[in-house]
């Protein structure tokens, strides 16, 4: 079975600074990987996804993520954080042949002025 | 299309009562998923449908939980004899199956139903 680890429960970043949120997955083959964002009391919005091909994927709101097979990682990055990026971020993995996604526990991003 | 709609947004119920939630997916999506999210956790899979067929159920879905998607459109999730441990956000998502979606595959989530059992 697949699993996802997001090692950081909370991260605080100054507005305008760069951001990297970590995600490690466990799965025996090439997974489908996703990053979602959730604002308080809301559902999840898809930021980006990786299925195959180019290991650097671009998403919405200026986010990107890089798939590194050797490290079983799919870290989310943004070069300059805006106050509106404060939210909870979830990494998820999907397995080929399975329809469901397994989510990490999330990383809460706080943006300081 | 206005996305995935869930109703109600919030529900407070007394322990032992039954509750039912509704999800209206994106109309062209043939798959519908229910997830549960508790405080400090990521969403956990409960069950999913392809059209009207319920194809998979998680071990989290106890006998008190039942889900239906009678005409392959909207879905309902019922919890009987609610317990305080059922308090959570219940999220619905929809998608096309992978064969049809191709590289557009991905879930669209609703805003969720927040259940509080007192």
Image (cartoon, coloured by chain):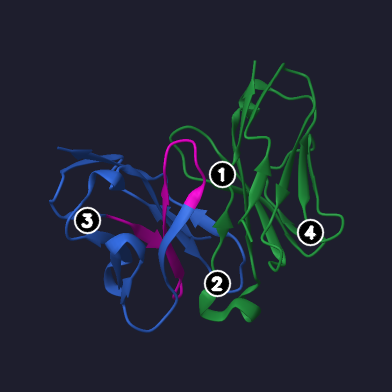
Q: Residue at x 33, y 66 (%)?
A: A72
Image spot of residue B9 (x, y percent): 62, 35
| Subunit of label 4 | B
Callout 2 crowding tier (Cα within 10 Å): few <14, some 14–19, many ≥20: some
Q: Which residue is mark 3?
A: A20
Q: Which residue is mark 1?
A: B111
Q: Which residue is mark 4?
A: B73
- Name above or below for residue B26 compared with residue B61: below
Direction from residue B109 to residue B118 in the image, left or right: right
Residue B60 shows in this picture: no
**Residue B105 has which mark?**
2
Q: CA distance from mark 4 to mark 2?
A: 19 Å
Name the quadrant containing residue B72: bottom right
Q: Nearer the viewer, mark 4 or mark 2?
A: 4
Task: Check if residue A28 falls in the magenta segment.
Answer: yes
Q: Nearer the viewer, residue A18 or B66?
A: A18
Q: Which chain is green?
A: B
**Magenta residues?**
A22-44
């Amino acid at each position: 079975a697949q699993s996802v680890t997001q090692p950081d429960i909370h991260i605080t970043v100054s507005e305008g600074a760069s951001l990297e949120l970590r995600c490690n997955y466990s799965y025996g083959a090439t997974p489908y990987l996703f990053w979602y964002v959730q604002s308080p009391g809301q559902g999840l919005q898809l930021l980006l996804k990786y299925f195959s091909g180019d290991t650097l994927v671009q998403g919405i709101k200026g986010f990107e993520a890089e798939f590194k097979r050797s490290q079983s990682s799919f870290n989310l990055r943004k070069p300059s954080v805006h106050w509106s990026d404060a939210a909870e971020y979830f990494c998820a993995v999907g397995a080929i042949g399975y329809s469901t996604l397994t989510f990490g526990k999330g990383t809460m991003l706080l943006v300081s002025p | 299309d206005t996305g995935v709609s869930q109703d109600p947004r919030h529900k407070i119920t007394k322990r032992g009562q039954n509750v039912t939630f509704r999800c209206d997916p994106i109309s062209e999506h043939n798959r519908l998923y229910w997830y549960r999210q508790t405080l400090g956790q990521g969403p956990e899979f409960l069950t999913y449908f392809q059209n009207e067929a319920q194809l998979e159920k998680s071990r989290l879905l106890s006998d008190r939980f039942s889900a239906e998607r009678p005409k392959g459109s909207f879905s309902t999730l019922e919890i009987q004899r609610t317990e305080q441990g059922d308090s959570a956000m219940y999220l619905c998502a929809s998608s096309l199956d992978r064969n049809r979606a191709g590289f557009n595959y991905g879930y669209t989530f609703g805003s969720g139903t927040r259940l509080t059992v007192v």
